[in-house]
Image (tube, rainbow, N blue to C red):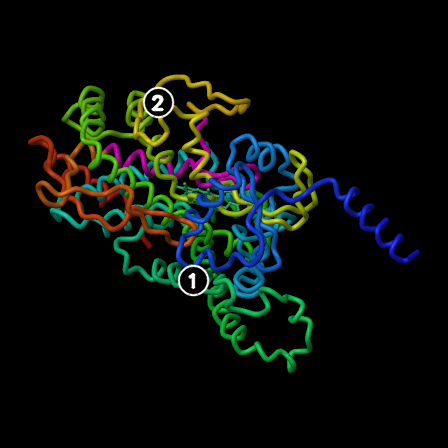
Amino acid sequence: MFQAGVLAALFLFLFFSRRHRLPPGPSGNVAGEFTNLTMPEVFEKWRRKYGRIFSFKLGTRIVIVLNDINATTDLLDKRGEIYSSRPRFVVSHEILSDGKRGLSAPYGEHWRKWRKLQHMGMNGKAALYYRDQQTLEAAFLLREMLASASGHEQALQRFVTSNVLGIAYGRRILDLKDEMVSFNYKSALEFQRASTPGKYIVETWPSLLWLPRPLQWFRPGLEVLEKIRDKDRETYMSYFNGVKQRSEAGIAKDCMATYSLSHGGNQGMTDVEVAYALSAPFSAGVDTTLSAIRWSLVAAICFPDVLKRIQAELDSVVGQDRMPTFDDERSLPFLGAFIKEVTRWRPVVPIGIPHATTKADVYDGYEIPKGATVFSNIDVLVKDPNLFDDPEAFNPSRFLTQHKPAGNWNGKVESGFTIPFGFGRRVCPGMHVALQSTFISMARIFWAFDVLPAAEGSSIDPTKTVNRGTTREPAPFQFRVRVRHPDVERIIEAESADADFRLKEWEY
Ligand code: HEM
């Protein structure tokens, strides 16, 4: 009797002392939900049921999903000291990458130094330096597009990849068969494979790694990854050393690698850490920027009136005697609004890259445990009717007028529209270079060409998408380009011949 009373008292104490609950959400084993639907689709299904913040358990992890701009900025921006880590990836980050990749690094000293280098190499001011290469590569891109009536995928991919390698190493590529490209793709693929849920037992039970090696029956699988890691490290080091040699010879182009060399010796990072940090622009910047460019083309094909308005603006500001440049950017507000609207209409990282908490927290009466994985559902935020009228419509003009969003969010939707690039201390450091690449390629393509469906009368369905890791792109589509005015071919030939010559500075 006494025992029962004590138990009852204990139960009541625990019940009432635990004032905060996890946000609502599905219970039990939810892993099966992700077999037939993509993560953004599952999140959407649960959002409709559970609302602005929901939670679920995946293996041993608590996952919180934020579907509301105020909750997202309150937590990821304003409580950045708690919400800026990444979920732990034992195999892909700690074993395969030796803990060196910053994108998957936990919040802490290593990430801070890595982040400083990303910032130094790509902040708004540093980004201006890459405009030369981006402009020249865009002339080259037009020549490649002119040479083939359709199937411009390779040309676009080369354009984006070359610019990203220019940022990291001050190097360009002439084609996609380049060894640096195949190596980086292979390495990204290995990272993705190593992150596959359920593939490695140590992902769920990391303490197994404390077993004496001879007892680690799972070792052979990890040893394969350790060999890949050694090769990765050697290759990244060879790229960094290549820039060092060019820098010593006084012929290196300014890039993230030369910034690290010239600003007080690697920012306290070891050579290997810098070498890994230089791989981030490729792994985070190619698929994302390429996807933004593909969506821009899809939008231009699906909304021909919008394309006509961009072209009218280009004709009146730039004329037909020369190609647009970055100097025209301020005079092309509709094109700028178009690019913002594309990033809103089809965000290329639909559910962001998950953050993780480093301390327990309470928000809106909900418990957010330490170590929780926190997603910001970008796809939903950019379609919030409180922020955007008629959010499903593709309407670049919404970014032409000062727009005060409803609700109590005091972020600026108009000039400071950065939701597609994430939040807080982890916000995309490549945002400026990505927008520059998108601007110059779109300005030049739309100046030179009408962008049309591949066959007369055919169309593209902009709701068909393909998810690739964390990015989402349009389903493969074909389009053709038609020269807009008589001088286009002559101007492309002249500009691209000049680009061939000037881009030699980036060739090695
Ligand atoms: C349209 C193109 C792009 C989009 C939409 C995009 C979006 C994002 C998003 C949503 C994140 C996660 C932010 C967060 O955790 O809250 C991110 C992170 C990141 N992005 Fe981008 N990105 C783009 C292009 C680029 C480019 C071109 C680069 C580099 C050249 C780049 C480098 C990075 C890096 C290094 C991170 C990790 C930051 C960290 O963990 O601290 N991104 N990006």
Task: Answer above or below: position of 60 versus 432.
Answer: below
Q: Main secondary structure of the magenta part?
A: helix
Q: Position of residue 68 (x, y in %)?
A: 52, 34
What is the quadrant of residue 263 in the picture? top right
- Side (left or right) of 416 relative to 21: left
Query: Can residue 250 be seen?
Result: no
Residue at x-position 40% and y-position 38% = 433
Residue extending farthest to the bottom is 214
Residue at x-position 59% and y-position 43% = 24
**From mark 1 to mark 2, how far is it between C-alphas?**
40 Å
- Side (left or right) of 66 relative to 371: left
Numbered label attached to residue 241: none
Circle 1: element type: helix
Residue at x-position 64% and y-position 82% = 214
Task: Answer above or below: position of 432 versus 98.
Answer: above
Which region shows up in magenta? 415-443
For label 1, the residue is 187
For label 2, the residue is 398
Residue at x-position 51% and y-position 25% = 411
- Side (left or right) of 159 relative to 115: left
Mark toward the start of the polypeptide (1 vs 2): 1
Q: Give the residue type at disc 1.
A: Ser
